[in-house]
Image (tube, grey):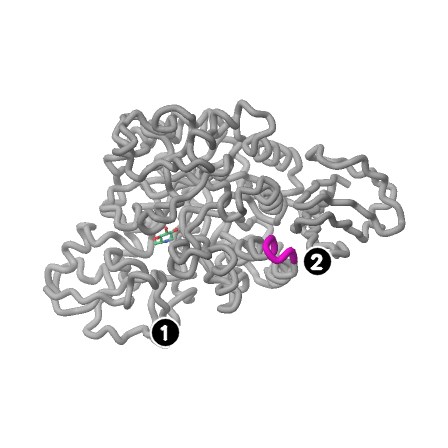
């Protein structure tokens, strides 16, 4: 791969759910050779980096986020050699690969936990967090509210409770134990030595517990993460850590490290972190035809070190989280986007992008346009590039993890197995079924959503200012219009979005660009006059969006 150590600043990420992507051996479950066979597809779409969901041996109580062996590949997905081949084949196509690093917890089937619960004096006992009562750390919230009554579960055999922030089948590791802290760095080295390009680090706020706190974002946690970063920098320069911390922007800022008052000081913790709070606000803005919440959260988003980057997303493999909104907004979002109670899960909504946006091509496009022009590197969730649907009746979050719809043929081109044996059923309703929504059909149709997304990817990459430039939100004379000015030393791009179903005229203060002739990067606008000294007026159709190079 090219040696550019800041590659992630302007990269397009693509999130792959291995089990649902492509099945090479006809067992109804996606696997590594299947993914390898689809790398040409990802290259054609233009993605720079794949984020692979957990592929380790696991009882799959949490779809692989419950790891039973950190040093192997789940037999359903192939072998460690297949993994090496994946990395080599991806790199040969200029695509990087990051894997999930699940530091916080293991599966209860992990040999460490199996040992730990054998007796109180087992050498592995201290790999986990035990207590005589379930009354410790009462200020820590429960995350999987729908299923877990407590963060403590009683282990009858040894008469103590163990601590878990997620399912009871996912005991938290004890980072106060130096052996644990060391061992997880070995895990990191093991996968880095296979040539991967870094990690998406799972559930990082919760590594340590301290009485009297909410056990999130503790100084001890940051200190450990900085240690992890040092290992990467020293031993694997160019590799990245993308942090999953579902937190407010000001609580996220410390995860980048560096100096909070000086973005010129390089970050020394995470290279990237997901920007969780902006995501639900994009959906809210689209329903209310009012962009103020997006502006507000972005105004409260601190500057980050120059060598760091946000990661932005519309959807992922989890429920659309409403943790980072007020209680009032949560109720509103549920009312607007999850009218059927089955659509709700924990503090979120288990639906995919296209159904959330009424399968309205204009809304799907404008939401993606925001994704591709906000500060940060965008992530595409597999299947959203063709507008796949969901199945709210499946267990947990499986309804947004259904098999990729490659063709209209048998098994949707996902697998040769009898579709009745697929790990979860294909979507086959009249609106979103694979017969109608599939990659082959959309690649063949130049007007398809797939081609629009591919164009956004290409244009974004051709205009690095969208990755590197600073971002200013301009007043546009309408609540429904989101106007972002991305500016660098050599280029400026103005992105306009009409989040309403009625035509709007954006009126923009562009005097400092007087004389510039805007270039319509996506080829969507009517002819535009040069910028003058008066406020610049642009007409936008319902849900219209324009990227104008000034
Ligand atoms: C966050 C992951 O995205 C989610 O899928 C998982 O259930 C939890 N972390 C626990 O690992």
Q: Which residues are magenta?
A: 285-290
**Residue farthest right in this picture:** 533
- Principal secondary structure, stretch drawn in magenta: helix
**Residue farthest front in this picture:** 430
Q: Residue at x 27, y 61 (%)?
A: 177
- Number of callouts: 2
| Disc number lying in front (1 or 2) | 2
Give the crowd class for mark 2: few <14, some 14-19, many >=20 residues within 10 Å. Answer: some
Residue in the foreground of this view, choosing between 455 and 219: 455
* Element type at mark 2: loop
Q: Residue at x 57, y 62 (%)?
A: 260
* Element type at mark 1: loop
Give the crowd class for mark 1: few <14, some 14-19, many >=20 residues within 10 Å. Answer: some
Q: Residue 515: where, in percent of width, then height?
A: 87, 42
Q: Is residue 256 visible?
A: no
Quadrant the C terminus occupies: top right
**Magenta-span inclusion, residue 430:** no
Q: Residue 352: where, in percent of width, then height?
A: 46, 46
Residue 407 image-quadrant placement:
top left
**Magenta-span inclusion, residue 286:** yes
- In the picture, measured across the screen, residue 458 lies left or right of residue 177, that is right
Q: Is residue 111 visible?
A: yes
Number of the label disc, if any, that sits on residue 403: none
User: Pointer 1: what residue?
Assistant: 139
Question: Upstream in the sequence, badge 1 or badge 2?
Answer: 1
Residue 229 position (above or below residue 162) = above
User: Pointer 2: what residue?
Assistant: 479
Q: Residue 233: where, in percent of width, then height?
A: 45, 46
Residue 334 position (above or below residue 33) = below
Residue in the foreground of this view, choosing between 385 and 177: 385
Distance in Å between CA atoms under marks 1 and 2: 39 Å
Q: Residue 427: where, in percent of width, then height?
A: 39, 37
């Amino acid at each position: 791969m090219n040696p550019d150590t800041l590659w992630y600043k302007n990269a397009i990420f693509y999130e792959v759910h291995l089990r649902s992507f492509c099945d090479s051996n006809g067992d109804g479950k996606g696997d590594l050779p299947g993914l390898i066979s689809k790398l040409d597809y990802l290259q054609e779409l233009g993605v720079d980096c794949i984020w692979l969901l957990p592929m380790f041996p696991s009882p799959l109580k949490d779809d692989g986020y419950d790891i039973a062996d950190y040093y192997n590949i789940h037999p359903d997905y192939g072998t460690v050699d297949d993994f090496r081949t994946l990395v080599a084949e991806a790199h040969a196509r200029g695509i990087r690969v990051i894997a999930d690093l699940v530091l916080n917890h293991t599966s209860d089937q992990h040999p460490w936990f199996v040992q730990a619960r054998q007796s109180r004096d087992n050498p592995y006992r201290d790999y986990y967090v035990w207590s005589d009562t379930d009354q410790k750390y009462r200020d820590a919230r429960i995350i999987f509210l729908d299923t877990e009554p407590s963060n403590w579960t009683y282990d009858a055999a040894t008469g103590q409770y163990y601590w878990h922030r997620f399912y009871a089948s996912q005991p938290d590791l004890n980072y106060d134990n130096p052996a644990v802290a060391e061992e997880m760095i070995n895990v990191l080295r093991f996968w880095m030595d296979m040539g991967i390009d870094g990690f998406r680090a799972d559930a990082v706020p919760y590594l340590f517990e301290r009485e009297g706190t909410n056990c999130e974002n503790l100084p001890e946690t940051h200190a450990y993460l900085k240690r992890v970063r040092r290992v990467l920098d020293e031993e694997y320069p160019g590799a990245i850590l993308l942090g999953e911390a579902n937190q407010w922007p000001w609580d996220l800022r410390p995860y980048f490290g560096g100096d909070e008052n000086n973005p010129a000081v390089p970050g020394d913790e995470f290279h990237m972190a997901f920007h969780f709070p902006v995501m639900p606000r994009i959906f809210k803005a689209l329903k209310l035809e009012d962009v103020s919440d997006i502006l507000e959260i972005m105004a409260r988003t601190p500057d980050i070190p120059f060598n760091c980057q946000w990661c932005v997303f519309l959807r992922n493999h989890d429920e659309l989280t409403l943790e980072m909104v007020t209680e009032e907004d949560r109720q509103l979002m549920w009312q607007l986007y999850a009218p059927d109670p089955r659509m709700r899960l924990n503090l979120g909504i288990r639906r995919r992008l296209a159904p959330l946006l009424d399968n309205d091509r204009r809304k799907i496009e404008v939401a993606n346009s925001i994704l591709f022009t906000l500060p940060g590197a965008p992530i595409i969730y597999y299947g959203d590039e063709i507008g796949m649907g969901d199945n709210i009746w499946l267990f947990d979050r499986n309804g947004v993890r259904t098999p990729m719809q490659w063709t209209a043929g048998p098994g949707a081109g996902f697998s040769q197995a009898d579709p009745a044996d697929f790990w979860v059923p294909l979507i086959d309703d009249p609106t979103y079924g694979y017969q109608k929504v599939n990659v082959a059909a959309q690649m063949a149709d130049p007007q398809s959503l797939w081609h629009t997304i591919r164009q956004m990817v290409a244009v974004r990459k051709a205009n690095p200012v969208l990755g590197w430039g600073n971002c200013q939100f301009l007043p546009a004379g309408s609540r429904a219009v989101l106007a972002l000015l991305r500016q660098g030393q050599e280029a400026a791009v103005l992105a306009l979005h009409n989040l309403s179903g009625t035509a709007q005229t954006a009126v923009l203060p562009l005097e400092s660009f007087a004389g510039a002739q805007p270039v319509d990067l996506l080829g969507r606008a009517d002819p535009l006059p040069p910028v003058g000294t008066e406020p610049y007026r642009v007409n936008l159709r319902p849900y219209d969006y324009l990227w104008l190079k000034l």
